[in-house]
Image (cartoon, grey):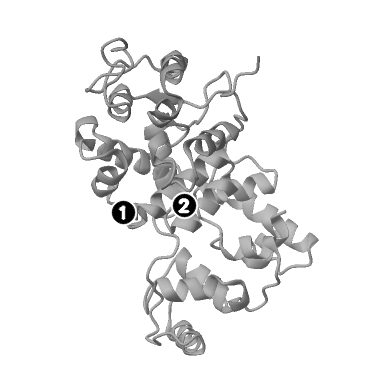
């Protein structure tokens, strides 16, 4: 008989993380940090079942203590009794035999360890649909995470990297007892040191700013990309804001970013998934480091060390020449669109 909990254990792709980060408005590194702390960065056991943790105190609460006297190992007023790993499934199955709905709601599931009783706030009609998504693959686990974050308004905390505030909402009022906030902060710092995407892919920009976010802004405005927010860039921003009916102060905030990244706003955007994906990516150039660079290197079939050095620059220029693009070694929207499937 097939195991109802065995599913597709294929890991998430870089593109999956990018799409989720864009929906939330946070960094890829922030999402990876939560995943690392909750499940050591993987949603499935080696046998193809989602990672779970059965919470006996939740089962006790949901079943009003009806099974506590006879089944104290899986129903008890206080948390505990964990076995870990595959050993959690016998506990779950024992509870299912008593009350299936309560049992499924009493376990945390997958890469982001979302409790079953949070099925509705994760975007599912019932706990059975939620569990099916957890079993079907990490993509469903990620979708549930995004839904949970947005429904519970934890996106602001994740964007600001307010780990204490995030852990309070995600892990509950006792988060500090397990040091969740500091674990997530350290995991985030580790991913950033290893080259995850910048802390905020769409920061507030104004006259005098510089760097990769300004390159991205200039790309979306159809300006020469020098990475310097000077008078010409400000003038273009003001004109764009006026054209969109926004407050024309020349400062690029959330509303301006949203308008800029709408497909119809791009200077030469066509209605295609590759162009939309390209516009959501920041430009890359020599000297950049990080997860985006590693992703670029994979597309170019280079060793993915995450450092945009001379070898990567040459490969980019060779690719640009092969596609009749300007061979400047800068990976802007046109180059991304040609690279992405």
Question: Crowding at label 2, few (<14), some or many (≥20) Cα neighbours within 10 Å?
Answer: many
Name the secondary structure under disc 1.
helix
Residue 249 position within the rendered picture, expressed as x and y whole percent measured from the top left: 37, 86
Residue displayed at 32% across by 30% down: 62
- Residue closest to the eye, 140 or 263: 140
**Image: 208 above or below 196:** below
Is residue 184 positioned above or below 53 on the image? below
- Mark 1 touching mark 2, by CB under 8 A? no
Q: In this view, does 232 lie above or below 219?
A: below
Q: Nearer the viewer, residue 143 or 254?
A: 143
Reading the chain from its start, which is encountered first: label 1 or label 2?
1
Query: Going 33% across and 16% down the picture, which residue do you hit?
Result: 74
Question: In this figure, which residue is indicated by the disc labeled 1?
Answer: 157
x then y, percent, for residue 77: 22, 22
Q: Label for residue 197?
A: 2
Residue 248 in view here: yes
Mark 1 is surrounded, within 10 Å at the Cα level, by few (under 14), some (14 to 19) or many (20 or more) other residues, namely some
Left or right: residue 12 versus residue 40 is right
Expressed as whole percent of the image width and height from the top left, the position of residue 299 reads 68, 48
């Amino acid at each position: 008989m097939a195991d109802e909990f065995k599913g597709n254990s294929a890991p998430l792709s870089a593109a999956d993380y990018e799409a989720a980060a864009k929906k939330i408005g946070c960094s890829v590194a922030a999402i990876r940090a939560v995943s690392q702390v909750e499940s050591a960065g993987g949603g499935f056991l080696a046998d193809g079942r989602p990672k779970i943790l059965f919470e006996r105190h939740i089962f006790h609460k949901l079943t009003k203590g009806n099974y506590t006297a006879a089944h104290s190992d899986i129903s008890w007023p206080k948390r505990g009794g964990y076995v870990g790993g595959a050993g959690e499934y016998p506990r779950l199955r024992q509870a299912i035999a008593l009350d299936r709905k309560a049992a499924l709601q009493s376990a945390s599931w997958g890469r982001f360890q979302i409790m079953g009783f949070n099925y509705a706030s994760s975007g599912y009609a019932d706990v059975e649909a939620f569990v099916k998504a957890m079993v079907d693959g990490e993509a469903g686990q990620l979708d549930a995470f995004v839904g949970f974050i947005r429904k519970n308004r934890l996106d602001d905390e994740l964007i600001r990297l307010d780990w204490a505030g995030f852990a309070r909402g995600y892990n509950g009022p006792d988060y500090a007892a397990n040091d969740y906030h500091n674990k997530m902060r350290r995991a985030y710092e580790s991913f950033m040191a290893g080259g995850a995407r910048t802390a905020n892919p769409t920061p507030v920009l104004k006259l005098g700013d510089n760097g990769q976010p300004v390159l991205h802004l200039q790309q979306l405005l159809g300006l020469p990309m020098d990475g310097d927010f000077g008078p010409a860039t400000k003038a273009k921003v003001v004109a764009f804001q006026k054209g969109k009916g926004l407050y024309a102060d020349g400062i690029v905030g959330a509303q301006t970013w949203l308008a800029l990244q709408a497909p119809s706003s791009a200077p030469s955007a066509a209605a295609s998934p590759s162009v939309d994906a390209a516009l959501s990516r920041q430009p890359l150039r020599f000297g950049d480091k990080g997860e985006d660079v590693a992703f670029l290197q994979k597309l170019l079939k280079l060793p993915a060390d995450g450092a945009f050095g001379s070898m990567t620059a040459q490969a980019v220029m060779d690719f640009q020449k092969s596609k009749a693009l300007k061979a400047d070694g800068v990976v802007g929207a046109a180059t991304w669109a040609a690279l992405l499937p």
